[in-house]
Image (cartoon, grey):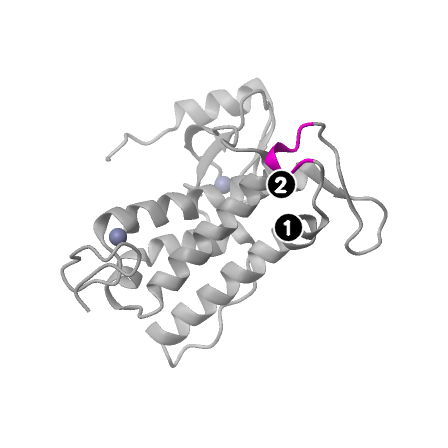
Amino acid sequence: MTSCELCGEESAGRYLCERHTVRLARQLADLPTLYAEVGECLVPRRSGWGEIIATKAAAGPQSPLNEDVLDTVSGARAAEVVRLWRVDVQRVRWPHHGAPAPAPLAADCRWLAMELDWIAAHYPAAGDLAREIWTLGAQARSVVGDPAPRPQRLGTCVAITAEGVVCGAVISRLPGKTRVQCQWCGYVYETGLDWMRLQHFQPQESA
Ligand SMILES: [Zn+2]
Ligand SMILES: [Zn+2]
């Protein structure tokens, strides 16, 4: 195995080349925001499963609504797919550990992103993983429109978690939003004071 599973380029013995590793990292970082946006575009009509209507007039290139897309594009499904990858990566890497505890999409994406270096170097299904993450992103964009609104990166979460440490998850918001909930620890940034604290306590950027 000396070439990237996505582009076939020389990859120094890794399953993914540098360029595709970086792309996968970016997609994993974007996915929770994309599916949060999908959730705002599509709401269940009643409590009935699968009955979904669009709440936004311009739903992007899929208008008029294609119901197959609405059936397959949902945050719940994305979370399920990403979860299965996390379970498999963990199984291959640490065969003696049990399955990971249930976690939201953002947490599973973050976990995979943190393991990305190992995945690119040692995980034989890295190419399939990268393709599926790409597909999930593309499906979400087919609902929210492409290009999706670019979230502004505001810094890292300064809330103190239950474990007594600074959360540190990336806080970003879509243009025009004044209320953002940290997808990792759940802290809500809403008031002017919240935003000031966020700015004030930012660690110095190292990268
Ligand atoms: Zn590549
Ligand atoms: Zn947080």
Q: CA distance from mark 2 to mark 1?
A: 7 Å
What residue would you read off at disc 2?
A: 38
Q: Amino acid at mark 2?
A: Val
SS assignment at label 2: helix
Residue at disc 2, CB closer than 8 Å to ligand 2:
no
Q: Residue at x 52, y 32 (%)?
A: 148
Instruction: Specify the segment rendered in magenta.
Output: 58-63
Q: Position of residue 149 (x, y in %)?
A: 52, 28
Quadrant of the rendered image containing residue 192: top right
Indicate whether residue 60 is drawn in magenta.
yes
Quadrant of the rendered image containing residue 169: top left
What residue would you read off at disc 1?
A: 74
Disc 2 and disc 1 in contact, CB within 8 angstroms: yes
- 198 relative to 7, above or below: above
Q: Position of residue 31 (x, y in %)?
A: 49, 45
Q: Is residue 183 visible?
A: no
Q: Position of residue 119 (x, y in %)?
A: 31, 62
